[in-house]
Structure formats: C-alpha cells, structure tokens
C-alpha cells in the first residue's frame, strides 16, 4: 500500500471510530491486491460491533467522512459497513460473494 493511501486510511479510521464502534478495517479490491491505477478508489470494509443497523444510513454517514478525507488526501475511500455478526454468518448477508472476496483479498489496516 502506498504512503498516500495509508495516510488516507489512517485519517478515515480515526474519524469513523469517533462516530461508530469499529472493531477493525480491511482494505480490499484493487488497492489491496496491488493492481490499482492512480485514480482507483480505496475499498474499505468497516467492521462494526453490536447489532446490525440501518445499512444505508451508516454507509451515507461513512461516505461523508470519506469525502472529508478525499478533500485532504486526494484518495477516494469507498466505505462498506459490515457488522461483526454478518461477517460470522455471511450466508445471511445481502452479498455473500463480496464477503468471500474480502476474506480472500483483504488486508487488515
């Protein structure tokens, strides 16, 4: 992971952890695999403790945080909220294939 992406994720992690009960963050997609272009976004799964909440509401709140990070770093973070319970039972998740890809290619940050 390049230094600019690392800086952006560190900033995003600090800000998102102020608002949500985050258990961990996992970078996935092209930046995790190392086959990204300069303009590729940084896909970040944000694992949350507790009962599942409103996905859209949480994703929008995280997107607002990610936008602030974009303005500061130039790196576009694409957050994906995942509750720990969904990770433990991917068959109940709306897109279990996506969770399998995160498990396969993801890098804890």
Image: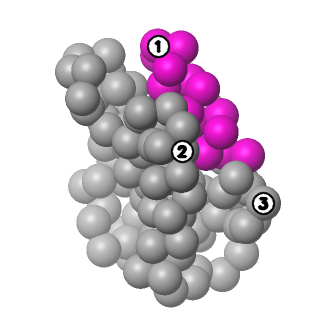
Q: Is residue 5 magenta?
A: yes
Quick check: 104 above or below 100? above
Q: What is the span of residues highlighted in magenta in the rendered image?
A: 1-14
Q: Is residue 31 left or right of residue 14?
A: left
| Position in image of residue 71 (x %, y %) | 47, 43
Residue hosting label 3:
18
Q: Which of the 4 image quarters holds residue 43?
A: top left
Tell me the element at label 2: helix
Q: Residue 66 or 98: which is nearer the viewer?
A: 66
Q: Which of the 4 image quarters holds residue 61?
A: bottom right
Residue 89 in view here = no
Depth-wise, is mark 2 or mark 3 nearer the camera?
2
Q: Residue 102 or 9: which is nearer the viewer?
A: 9
Residue hosting label 1:
2
The residues bearing labels 3 and 1 have C-alpha atoms spaced at a distance of 25 Å
Predominant SS along the magenta part = helix
């Amino acid at each position: 992971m390049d230094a600019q992406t690392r800086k952006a994720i560190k900033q995003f992690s600090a800000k998102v952890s102020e608002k949500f009960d985050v258990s961990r963050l996992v970078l996935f997609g092209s930046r995790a695999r190392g086959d990204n272009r300069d303009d590729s976004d940084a896909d970040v799964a944000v694992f949350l403790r507790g009962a599942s909440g409103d996905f859209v509401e949480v994703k929008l709140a995280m997107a607002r945080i990610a936008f602030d990070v974009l303005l500061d770093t130039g790196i576009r973070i694409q957050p994906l909220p995942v509750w720990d319970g969904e990770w433990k039972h991917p068959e109940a998740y709306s897109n279990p294939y996506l969770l399998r890809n995160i498990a396969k290619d993801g890098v804890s940050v």
